[in-house]
Amino acid sequence: MRLDDLDLRELLDYRPEGGLIHFAGRRVVLLDVVALGLLRRELVDRLGIGGARGILTRMGYAHGWRIAEESRALPWDEPDAWRRAGGRFHRLQGLVGFEPIAPSGPDAPFAEALWHDSYEAEQHLRQLGRADEPVCWSLTGFASGYLSRAFDAPIFCVETRCAARGDAACRMVGRRREDWGEAIEAHLPYYEEDCLEEALRATTEALRRTERELGARRRVLARGLPEEDPSGCIAFSPKMRDALALARRAAKVDVTVLVRGETGVGKERLAQLVHEESPRAAGPFVAVNCGAIPASLLESELFGHAKGSFTGATQDRIGLFEAAQGGTLFLDEIGELAPETQVRLLRVLQEREVRRVGETAPRPIDVRVVAATHRDLRADIRAGRFREDLYYRLAVMEIEVAPLRERREDVLPLARLFLERASARTRPGEPALGLTPGAADRLLAHGWPGNVRELENAMERAAVVAEGERVDQADLPASVRAAAPAEDDAALTLAEAQRRHVERVLEAHGGHRAKTAAALGIGEATLYRMLARWRG
């Protein structure tokens, strides 16, 4: 048997009615790649990138070693042919397309190849989104294990390019241990069992943080505040509840969604909710701020580009539409798109296909688009700044997120939630911070031009500077401290000031007396007596 004669029909042995399947004499099983992708995501979520990479690398190494051991017994025409067959076995098993690169020059690596259609890169993109580093961990492990067994020497393979981070194809380089020098040191821990220790330490710390956050939430509930919405959003106000309900309805239907609202109100979180509660939840959620990327680069970022299509395009690169395949692409600040980019985006949405910059052949896509803007797009249409046909294509479902100043019922619950989280980070092991009545007054009186984002930053600051067990007015940012109460309390008697404060807190909690009493730190009976006295 020659290398070129390797044929899956001869290597694969199975019963047509099902049961045992053998490959080259070894029992194998068929596994769905999406199931493997979900396993990868679970490993990353539980053990972190390092722990997941270590497990999958060693699994691949053992797989490659076993294939090399068993393939040695096949009837080869040349005694050493089996040593060079690892890439072909990779391809025959459906793991990756293998294209060897012929060695050239005195410093040529021991082995080098391009990998096409890597199942690992595909599933990493689908389950976890675009990666910053190469992610074909089991494939490099397989190549290392196969070569090490075949040549009876430690040979390590490293992925230098990867489709999961936007490269046109994956590229593998293999060298003997001694030829790598110090360059291999960063990769060796993933071949050793000890690499799990750091992952387990990180997991333990993550669990402790989670326990602290859960404890903080229990304390919130113990004070009579309702739990967050399951989406993680605070929605006490009718306007926010309506927005969440509409987002959930939109999630069930695979249409484009336009989220409108001021900066900082939580548009991206709402877009994530649409993704998480949709049939595309298992796919990637890819976000891009259209206003943060120069117009000259945005088309390449969205649609990808071909090598040589412009100065600096040294290789093919997939765009964000392709990276979001099977999932959701969130286009924030859609109103900032240049007119020519609006035309291309409209065509992509209409045709469900994307054409990379510098290419003529379109590529089909399966992506849901959720867009967001703080601009009045209808006014932009009238002014000729935004295409009307693109607007109607994006706004099949339109959701408006009200500013925080119109959701007063959410201010104090949000502030307390942010304080609980900030306390868990800045004061581990200590009781969570609360709010004094004066601080609560200022929070309710402030206009919050930066919306929820500004409130979260204010609570982060307060958690750092507060010296007691409660955040007081002096611990708030100057802009919040300067907020005038609804009425000038300086001229009021102590009793009248107390009454007006209680009534404001009661209004902020929608008239719910148990929640108001808990927020004020008094008993319900005390609150009832106060209200009865004031209201006759």
Image (tube, helix red, strand yellow):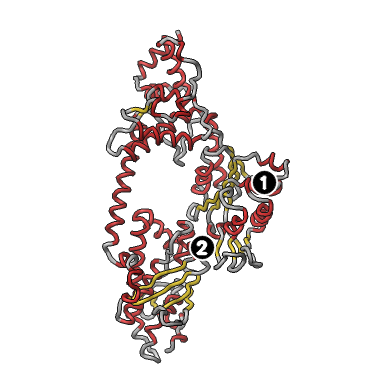
Residue 187, located in which quarter of the rendered image?
bottom left
Q: Which residue lies furthest to the bottom in this view?
A: 77
Viewer-side residue, 58 vs 227: 58
Q: Which amino acid does label 2 sit on?
A: Gly
Q: Which one is earlier in the sequence, the residue at label 2 or at label 1?
A: 2
Separation of disc 2 and disc 1 at Cα? 29 Å
Viewer-side residue, 16 vs 533: 533
- Above or below — where is 86 with respect to 484? below
Q: What residue type is labelled 1?
A: Tyr
Q: Residue furthest top?
A: 536
Quarter of the rendering occupied by the N terminus = bottom left
Q: What is the crowding at mark 1: few (fewer than 14 residues within 10 Å), some, or many (at least 20)?
A: some
Left or right, residue 203 beside residue 532 = left
Residue 110, located in which quarter of the rendered image?
bottom left
Foreground mark, 2 or 1, reads 2
Residue 56, x across and y down, in percent: 36, 65
Left or right, residue 25 beside residue 408 = left
Residue 489, x across and y down, in percent: 46, 15
Q: What secondary structure is marked by label 2?
A: loop
Residue 117, x across and y down, in percent: 50, 69
Q: What is the crowding at mark 2: few (fewer than 14 residues within 10 Å), some, or many (at least 20)?
A: many
Q: Mark 2 points at which residue?
A: 166
- Above or below — where is 255 with respect to 463? below
Observer able to see residue 12? no
Q: Residue at x 36, y 88 (%)?
A: 80
Residue 471, x across and y down, in percent: 37, 28
Q: Residue at x 56, y 40 (%)?
A: 246
Q: Which residue is drawn at 38% across and 34% down?
A: 419
Q: Name the residue under label 1.
A: 391
Observer able to see residue 328? yes
- Above or below — where is 201 with respect to 265? below
Left or right, residue 246 beside residue 5 = right
